[in-house]
Image (cartoon, rainbow, N blue to C red):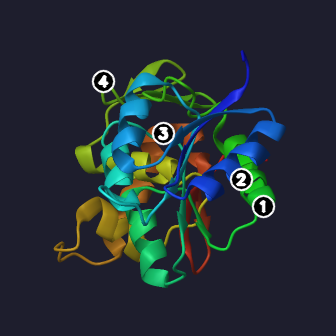
């Protein structure tokens, strides 16, 4: 099994779970199955997985709760699955830290393709030891709450650090200023959107050349992505 990507599949529908598992195994993934959120969290503590595919509507503990618990300790990529297509559900998933969102009825082949694409974006950046994130010369140690560029420690304010982690967690995704403000500063924050721009500017300056990974997307917001 060495070298195989490991996935934790959380789905309460037995037939759907087996169907999806078969497709992932055909593509050389090692699959760990959980029929509910409680089992999923127990497996997550026991096995170092590369990706989680998580159904939202489950008995005992729903996908929202599982995602929230996992995000308290890990940045492992998460794809959420739901039978509902409402935008509010997707917003909730992204705010909890989900990386992708798939609605039912789903094609297992498409799900595997999206999982593979997500892994290509994150492999080499968030690995098995996801406390240490590396992008070029930039290193973020989540356990120690430290940031370094080319081995030199960079002193960030708490908000600058939170902002950097939030951008990294949503690698490659364009984030609006409103989304960033709500997620990093909180819904009760009374400041305006210029707060985001100001902190982005300071963060880029402190990161030096590695600040180029924080990209401005005209009329949309910002994203964190290494240059092609």
Quick one: label 4 or label 1, which is nearer the N terminus? 1
Callout 1 secondary element: helix
Please determine whether, in this image, residue 71 is positioned above or below residue 65: above
Callout 3 secondary element: helix
Give the residue at mark 2.
19
For the N terminus, the image quarter is top right
Quick one: label 3 or label 4, which is nearer the N terminus? 4
Coordinates of residue 35 in the picture (x, y in percent) = 47, 48
Q: Nearer the viewer, mark 1 or mark 3?
A: 1
Quick one: label 1 or label 2, which is nearer the N terminus? 2
Quarter where residue 161 is shown? top left
Q: Nearer the viewer, mark 3 or mark 4?
A: 4
Give the residue at mark 3.
207
| One can see residue 172 in this view | no
Q: Nearer the viewer, residue 185 or 210?
A: 185
Callout 2 secondary element: helix
Q: Check residue 10 in the rendering and tell me which mark sits there, or answer none.
A: none
Quick one: label 2 or label 4, which is nearer the N terminus? 2
Task: Give the class, few, some or many, for how many residues have Cα within 10 Å of label 2's Cα (few <14, many ≥20).
Answer: few
Q: Check residue 144 in the rendering and tell me which mark sits there, or answer none.
A: 4
Task: Give the class, few, some or many, for how many residues have Cα within 10 Å of label 4's Cα (few <14, many ≥20).
Answer: few
Distance from Cα at disc 1 to Cα at disc 2: 13 Å
Distance from Cα at disc 2 to Cα at disc 3: 45 Å
Please determine whether, in this image, residue 26 is positioned above or below residue 110: above
Give the residue at mark 1.
110
Q: Nearer the viewer, mark 1 or mark 2?
A: 2
């Amino acid at each position: 099994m060495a070298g195989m990507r490991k996935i934790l599949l959380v789905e309460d529908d037995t037939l759907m779970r087996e169907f999806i598992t078969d497709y992932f195994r055909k593509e050389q993934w090692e699959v760990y199955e959980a029929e509910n959120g409680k089992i999923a969290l127990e497996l997550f503590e026991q096995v170092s997985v590369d990706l989680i595919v998580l159904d939202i509507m489950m008995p005992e503990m729903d996908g929202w709760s599982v995602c929230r618990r996992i995000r308290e300790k890990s940045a492992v990529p998460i794809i959420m699955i739901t039978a509902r297509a409402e935008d509010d559900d997707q917003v909730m998933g992204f705010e909890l830290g989900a990386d992708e969102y798939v609605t039912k009825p789903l094609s297992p082949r498409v799900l595997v393709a999206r999982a593979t694409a997500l892994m290509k974006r994150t492999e080499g950046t968030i690995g098995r030891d996801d406390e240490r994130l590396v992008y070029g010369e930039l290193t973020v140690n989540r356990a120690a709450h430290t940031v370094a560029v080319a081995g030199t420690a960079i002193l960030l304010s708490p908000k600058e650090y939170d902002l950097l982690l939030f951008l990294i967690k949503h690698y490659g995704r364009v984030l609006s200023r409103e989304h960033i403000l709500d997620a990093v500063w909180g819904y009760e924050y009374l400041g305006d959107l210029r707060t985001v721009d100001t902190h982005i500017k300071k963060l880029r300056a402190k990161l030096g050349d590695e600040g180029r990974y924080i990209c401005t997307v005209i009329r949309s917001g910002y994203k964190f992505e290494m240059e092609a």
